[in-house]
Image (spheres, grey):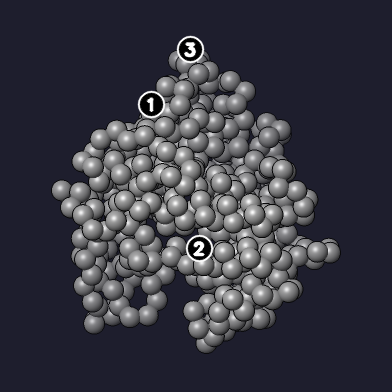
């Protein structure tokens, strides 16, 4: 493809600007074009994002011969058609999570990407934090000993206000699951990525706290609040609060809390891993630190310092000790790794932060088991890997019948 790489983006919403910022940091990637729902709206976004070319449809963008990589940041219901079109056009594809709305659809995209022979990736961006990679390296080196517990939370408050409504709460556009698909997926991916374990069984309790939301005409982007006096009430069924018990493949136990209606919690992602000799805890809101706990020695906090971190974590640090790095830097690390794979021309090259379509299908199966557990009354449910998995990210937990379990 030559020295320069052409990038096109479909779906210029909230997360799109971070994709564009990340690729512009690379130096050898040109943001060629974006595509949106209408030409007029796309042109406005293109001007805002300083992109020269606008398309009214994703079909036009994926057929642009100067584009080598397509970023799919559309609402979830468009992930399949946009991604398939890009794959059929022979483009590498980077998509926001979740990969698709059902495990079956995820498997379809996984198989299509394999058949196309192109690089495929999903932006589970918390993998890109240097202290996450430090925790992963220490766990892999046996510093914590055998893991016996993996637990944590992902809590937010942006949906506390009933005047907040976005496509994520629309089952047609966002899928049956809301909070679990949106942020629970991040935690599940992170837990397996750092621990090296696999979640094999789950027991979930889900609730819809805010059952009526008020939508205004116009934008339905995430984090938008409505001030329109003519708001329309909409009954919401997707969960905004969840508690899940977990079993891992080595016998470890765990738990997860997910919520988006909890005042004061802005982006409270936490992961703790307890082993026989040590515990490690990472918190996204203090993301430049890693807490290490011991029963026979003083607890310590390891801070982001390239001189002190492991060789595995060091490539994800770009500033000296005492200089804080944040969310956008971790996101850029993930994008950098993906483009390194694209430049290599080899799907066998696997940097630490790369999440392929196959990996993301695995996460969809975990979430599907959680939603099935809740839909069947809160019972232990095994995670079934692959396209045969059932669950809310699959076909059995449909909107028909599922809300009764959510609201019980």
Residue 64: tell me if it is visible: yes
Residue found at x 63% / y 75% = 61
Residue at mark 1: 253
User: What whole-number distance in Å separates the C-alpha atoms at marks 1 and 2?
Assistant: 34 Å
The 10 Å Cα crowd at callout 2, few under 14, some 14 to 19, many 20 or more, is: some
Query: Is 26 above or below relative to 356?
Result: below
Tag 2's secondary structure? helix
User: What whole-number distance in Å separates the C-alpha atoms at marks 1 and 3?
Assistant: 23 Å
Q: Nearer the viewer, mark 1 or mark 2?
A: 2
In this view, the residue farthest toward the right is 2
Q: Position of residue 36 (x, y in %)?
A: 53, 77
Q: Nearer the viewer, mark 3 or mark 2?
A: 2
Residue situated in front as seen by the camera: 121 or 153: 121
Q: Position of residue 26 (x, y in %)?
A: 73, 59
Q: Earlier in the sequence, mark 1 or mark 3?
A: 1
Tag 3's secondary structure? loop
User: What whole-number distance in Å separates the C-alpha atoms at marks 3 and 2?
Assistant: 52 Å
Residue at mark 2: 80
Image position of 288 (left or right of 281): right
Residue 30, quarter of picture:
bottom right
Residue found at x 84% / y 64% = 2
Residue found at x 50% / y 83% = 38
Q: Earlier in the sequence, mark 3 or mark 2?
A: 2
Image position of 144 (left or right of 204): right
Q: Earlier in the sequence, mark 1 or mark 2?
A: 2
């Amino acid at each position: 493809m030559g020295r320069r790489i052409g990038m096109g983006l479909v779906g210029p919403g909230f997360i799109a600007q971070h994709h564009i910022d990340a690729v512009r940091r690379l130096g050898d990637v040109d943001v060629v074009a974006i595509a949106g729902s209408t030409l007029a709206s796309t042109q406005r976004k293109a001007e805002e994002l300083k992109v020269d070319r606008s398309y009214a449809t994703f079909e036009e963008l994926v057929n642009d011969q100067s584009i080598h990589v397509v970023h799919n940041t559309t609402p979830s219901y468009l992930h399949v058609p946009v991604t398939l079109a890009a794959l059929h056009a022979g483009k590498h594809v980077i998509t926001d999570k979740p990969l698709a709305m059902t495990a079956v659809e995820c498997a379809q995209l996984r198989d299509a990407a394999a058949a196309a022979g192109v690089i495929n990736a999903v932006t589970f961006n918390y993998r890109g934090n240097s202290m996450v990679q430090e925790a992963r390296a220490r766990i892999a080196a046996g510093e914590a000993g055998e893991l016996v517990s993996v637990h944590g939370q992902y809590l937010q408050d942006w949906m506390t206000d009933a005047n907040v409504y976005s496509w994520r709460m629309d089952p047609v556009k966002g899928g049956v699951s809301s909070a679990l698909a949106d942020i629970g997926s991040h935690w599940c991916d992170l837990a397996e990525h750092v621990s090296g374990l696999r979640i094999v069984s789950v027991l979930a309790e889900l609730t819809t706290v805010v059952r009526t939301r008020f939508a205004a005409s116009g934008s339905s982007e995430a984090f938008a609040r409505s001030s329109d006096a003519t708001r329309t009430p909409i009954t919401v069924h997707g969960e905004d609060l969840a508690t899940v018990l977990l079993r891992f493949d080595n016998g470890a136990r765990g738990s997860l809390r997910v919520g988006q209606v909890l005042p004061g919690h802005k982006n409270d992602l936490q992961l703790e891993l307890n082993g026989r000799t040590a515990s490690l805890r990472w918190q996204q809101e203090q993301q430049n630190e890693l807490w290490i706990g011991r029963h026979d020695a003083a607890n310590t906090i390891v801070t982001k310092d390239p001189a002190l971190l492991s060789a595995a974590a060091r490539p994800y640090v770009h500033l000296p000790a005492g200089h804080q790095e944040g969310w956008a830097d971790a996101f850029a690390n993930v994008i950098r790794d993906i483009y390194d794979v694209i430049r290599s021309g080899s799907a066998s090259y696997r940097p630490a932060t790369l999440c392929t379509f196959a990996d993301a299908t695995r996460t969809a199966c975990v979430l599907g088991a959680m939603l099935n557990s809740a839909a069947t009354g809160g019972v232990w449910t095994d995670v079934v890997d692959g396209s045969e998995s059932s669950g809310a990210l699959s076909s059995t937990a449909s909107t028909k019948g599922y809300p009764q379990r959510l609201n019980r």
